[in-house]
Amino acid sequence: MTGDGAVPGTPHAVPAADQGTRPETTSPARHPGAHGTAPHLTAPRPAPATSPTDRHTPVGEPTTLLRRLLPPGRRPVGGGSTTARDLAVRHRLLLALSALLTLSLFLSYEGVHGDANPLRTSSAPAVLSLDTALYALGQAQRDAGAAAPTSDFQKQISVAAQSLAAAAGDDVGGPAGRQALQTVAGLITVYAVKVQQAQLQPADSVLREAYLSYATSVLTDQGSGIQARLKALQGQQRAAVHRQTSFGPLLWLGWTATLLLALALGAALLETQMFLRRRFRRRYNRGLLAAGALLAAGLAATLLFTVWTHQGMADTRDLLDRPLTGRLITDAGRHTAAYLAHTGFRASAAVWILIGGILLMALAETGLRRHIDDYRFRPR
């Protein structure tokens, strides 16, 4: 026995008041089986406190990667709701698709309707004017061999001159075409004068034959005659008609892209509507429904206008693609006016595509803005 009551050979006794506060020490004597002593028993350590959000997060859920991918301020803490992010993604997608569709539809629509008005007011009338001039000169050549000047010859020359003036007013071939028409008009005057001089000569006069021969060469010479020049101008004008009425690869690409964008936007609107219905228990969203109705109606109207205009332009091209004479020229003018009727009104509808695109984006914005604002100012 010692003075403090400790037994020699045994560990120093710890007061009961200090057993819960002093750190646990481990020695070989405290392990089971060491010197026959019993193991030291301690209370289990309490589990760390968990937040309510942690209790909803399954063990092993990869929330760390999600927090890294989301921008600061929108990362869900402990696997929280991603509704704000989902709304923002759909909002940006709808606005981007609406803007791209508006641009693509406007360019594709203009590619078809932009040439309809020049065809109706310039190209088609110019072709008919050149046909009229050629036909009138052919009739004048038939009357050129008369024994005396006739009114029919003068009438046909006047018709040819007026037709050339009308073609010049339609801007045939640009500045070069107008210069060529002025040259032809001068040659017609020379032709008419030589024919009149020939008709004033006796029937069997050598001078008469000379005048007629010269007049005929002015009219029919293969290289520089009036008819050759007019046919060259007419070929250029028919080529312009073909360019204006063709539906080339660029237009096919533009309309294909437009239809694909329209389908993508329609699918995005439908998916967003279903998302809002699942997440917010709202059956319909008026803004998105109005956007879908506007998309369907606008696309249908533009497609219908484009089909009508292109069909009229194609019929006009087929009608003007062959030489016309006599009454056929008058009939062709009437049919062309019917084929190209209302193309100016339909072409002016292009501005409504831009207005409709802005309205489409506004409706998509209105449909999602209230929900986005609710989650933007919701405390985290």
Image (cartoon, rainbow, N blue to C red):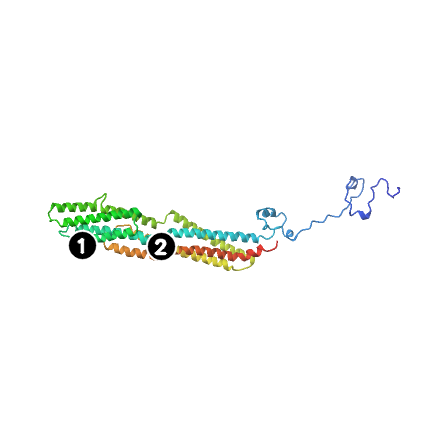
Query: Could you give the CA–CA distance between mark 1 and mark 2, rounded to whole angstroms?
Result: 41 Å
Q: Residues within 10 Å of mark 1 (few under 14, many from 20)?
A: some
The x and y percentages for residue 245 are 34, 50
Judging by the rendered image, the residue that carries numbered circle 2 is 309
Report which quarter residue 22 is drawn in: top right
* Mark 1 vs mark 2: in front: 1
How far across and how far down the image is residue 352, in percent? 42, 56
Dot 2: few (<14), some (14–19), or many (≥20) neighbours within 10 Å? many
Identify the residue under disc 1.
Answer: 152
Residue 333 to residue 183: above or below: below
Q: Viewed as shown, does residue 364 lie left or right of 19?
A: left
Residue 128, visible in the rendered structure: no
Label 2 secondary element? helix
Displayed quadrant of residue 295: bottom left
Q: Looking at the image, how many numbered discs can be counted on the residues?
A: 2
Residue sitting at x 53%, y 51%: 89
- Residue type highlighted by circle 1: Asp
The residue positioned 48% from the left and 59% from the top of the image is 290
Quadrant location, the N terminus? top right
